[in-house]
Amino acid sequence: MRITVTVDGTPYTDEVEPRLLLVHYLRDRLGKVGTVVGCDTSNCGACTVLLDGRSIKSCSVLAVQVDGQEVTTVEGLSLDGSLHPVQEAFREKHALQCGFCTPGMIMATIDLLAEDPDPDEKQVRHSLEGNLCRCTGYQNIVAAAQDAAQRLREAPAETQGGTR
């Protein structure tokens, strides 16, 4: 099947097998390896991307389902070589250890902050329930999400990279 999709601001038209998962299309066809293959069952959230601005687990979506839509990966967040405010907050708050879950956590955080620009700790934890981290204990991830919320409230929109 032929699909046309915009990924990180670039339009692509490709022939894909109807059963090809979005995560494999992004990684294997487009080289977007920041979208991590974790569990292939949508349990871990490592493959989270934004589809038309909303977070989805790309291992549970077929590439043909995103025809005509816009996908943002973690690689598409930076603007002119600068980290997105959420990426910067994760870096500064040490919200990672092995880094495997980090892209998915960042993308889920961006979706949360688009919906609620000032979440409390409980709201952050609830929002990230579908993303698993096996290393950190989540404290720094929650702190990074709240720090990112403040950064986004204070930053001009043009410095916020590939978000809605």
Image (cartoon, rainbow, N blue to C red):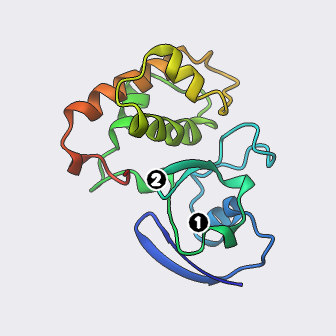
User: In terms of secondary structure, where does tag 2 sit?
Assistant: loop
Closer to us: 47 or 96: 47
- Name the outermost residue toward the front: 115
| Residue 24: % across, % down | 71, 63
Q: Which label sits on residue 31? A: 1
Image label count: 2
Closer to us: 38 or 66: 66
When the figure is inspected, residue 72 is found, relative to residue 93, above or below; the finding is below
At label 1, which amino acid type do we have? Gly
Marks 1 and 2, Cα distance to the nearest angstrom? 21 Å
When the figure is inspected, residue 107 is found, relative to residue 93, above or below; the finding is below
Closer to us: 18 or 95: 18
Q: How many other residues sit within 10 Å of disc 2, few (<14), some (14-19) or many (≥20)?
A: some
**Residue depicted at x 81% and y 46%:** 41
Q: Are marks 1 and 2 in contact (CB under 8 Å)?
A: no
Q: Identify residue for label 2.
A: 53
**Residue depicted at x 59% and y 29%:** 128
At label 2, which amino acid type do we have? Gly
Q: Quarter of the image holding residue 3?
A: bottom right
**Residue depicted at x 56% and y 20%:** 125
Q: Which label sits on residue 57? A: none
User: Is residue 60 found left or right of 136 in the rendered image?
Assistant: right
User: Is residue 37 found left or right of 107 in the rendered image?
Assistant: right
User: In terms of secondary structure, where does tag 1 sit?
Assistant: loop
- Tell me the mark number nearer the camera, choosing from 1 and 2: 2
